[in-house]
Each structure stands twice: as structure tokens, then as C-alpha cells.
Image (cartoon, rainbow, N blue to C red):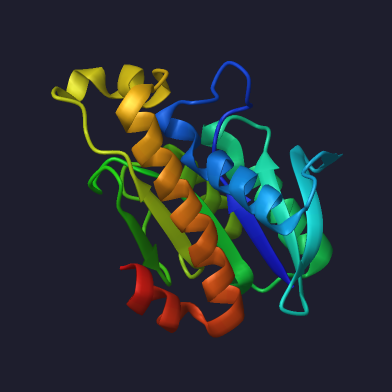
Amino acid sequence: MYLIVGLGNPEGEYSNTRHNMGFDTINHLSKKLNISVTKEKFKGLYGDGVINNEKIILLKPQTYMNLSGESIVKFRDFYKIPNENIIVIYDDIDIELGTIKIRKKGGPGTHNGMKSVIYELQTEDFPRIRVGIGKPMFKEMMIAYVIQKIQGEELEILDKSTEKAADAVCEIINNGIDKAMNIYN
């Protein structure tokens, strides 16, 4: 069983923002796999289905970004999912716009959502897919940059990135993380 988690802030007000790349990836997976992500449990919206005979849960924590780990740890513990089968997808300012990066494990960097996930899971040993959103011109603009509505060409680029991230999730489950890293990194 795999838990596939997209980090973001509750949609509506925060849809089409750079900080919701995880949610956007889950939305692509939901359409691609015909899995409705509408059930509520453990402070999250989720849906379940199957990829290549492997049961999966798609999860969008509804706790706001900085507390994302609270929902994830409850799903992990309830379903007894090993950490290596938890795939977390999130935005990353240190990666160029339009690029995705897959890692087997690692620290949170400056991402507060990932800080929460690592704190709650008590480990850095779980796969993640980072969707590059680029950086603002000035560090002081960071908060506005990540929650600002995106439009036009940038929206198209990020939509393709999240679609690529959704494909990478399927590749990880079908053929393993090493093969996915060779294809997408």
C-alpha cells in the first residue's frame, strides 16, 4: 500500500498558487486514475484506488501547510504504511520553474510543510517529489510569492510540471524509485 500526499493549503482561496503544487499533482492523479478525493478522515481529504495491483491512497491534508504532518502520520499509523511507501509532493523554491526532482529521502530545506511532515513521522526516510516554482526577486517577498495567484504562461508551465509529477508517482509505484529518478531527474 502507498500513501501519496500532496502538500498545499485548502483549495478555493489557495487554488492556482505556487504553494499548492502538491494538491495540483493529486488532482492530476485523481483524474488520471479515476479516483475521487472527496472522503474526509484524519484532517484530510482522500480517495483510494489501485495502480498496478498496488492499493494507493491519495491524500490532501486540510490542516494548512505548516501542520501537514498531523494528517499524514494518522494515515500512516492507521493503515500501517511503511515510510518508504509514503510519497510526498510539494513546491520547492530552490528548483527552477518547470522542473521536478525526485529524492528517496532528505531534509525539509526551508519548506515549513516538510518540516511538519518530518517532525510528525520522526524520519527523513521517505520519497518525495519536488515541483520547482522558482524564487521571487527579493527574499522579503517569499510569502506573497508562494500564495499569489499564478496566471498565463507560468500557470501552463506549472500545470505541465504537476502532470509530470503525477506521471512520476505512477513510475515509482510501477517500476521503483531508482527508475523514476533516472527518467525524471
Q: Quadrant of the C terminus?
A: bottom left
Total numbered badges shown on the rendered structure:
0
Residue 82 picture location, percent across and down: 66, 74
Residue 13 sits in which quadrant? top right
Left or right: where 82 falls relative to 117:
right
Q: Residue at x 45, y 40 (%)?
A: 159
Q: Residue at x 55, y 65 (%)?
A: 169
**Who is closer to the viewer here, 42 or 24?**
24
Specify the farthest residue to the left: 137
Q: Residue at x 82, y 39 (%)?
A: 38
Q: Residue at x 47, y 56 (%)?
A: 165
Residue 149 picture location, percent across and down: 42, 18
**Who is closer to the viewer here, 133 or 116?**
133
Residue 29 picture location, percent across and down: 63, 53
Left or right: where 78 falls relative to 151:
right
**Who is closer to the viewer here, 10 or 113?**
10
Residue 52 sits in which quadrant? bottom right
Q: Is residue 76 visible?
A: yes
Residue 182 picture location, percent across and down: 34, 78
Q: Is residue 118 visible?
A: no
Left or right: where 158 falls relative to 3:
left
Residue 159 higher or lower than 18, as above or below: below
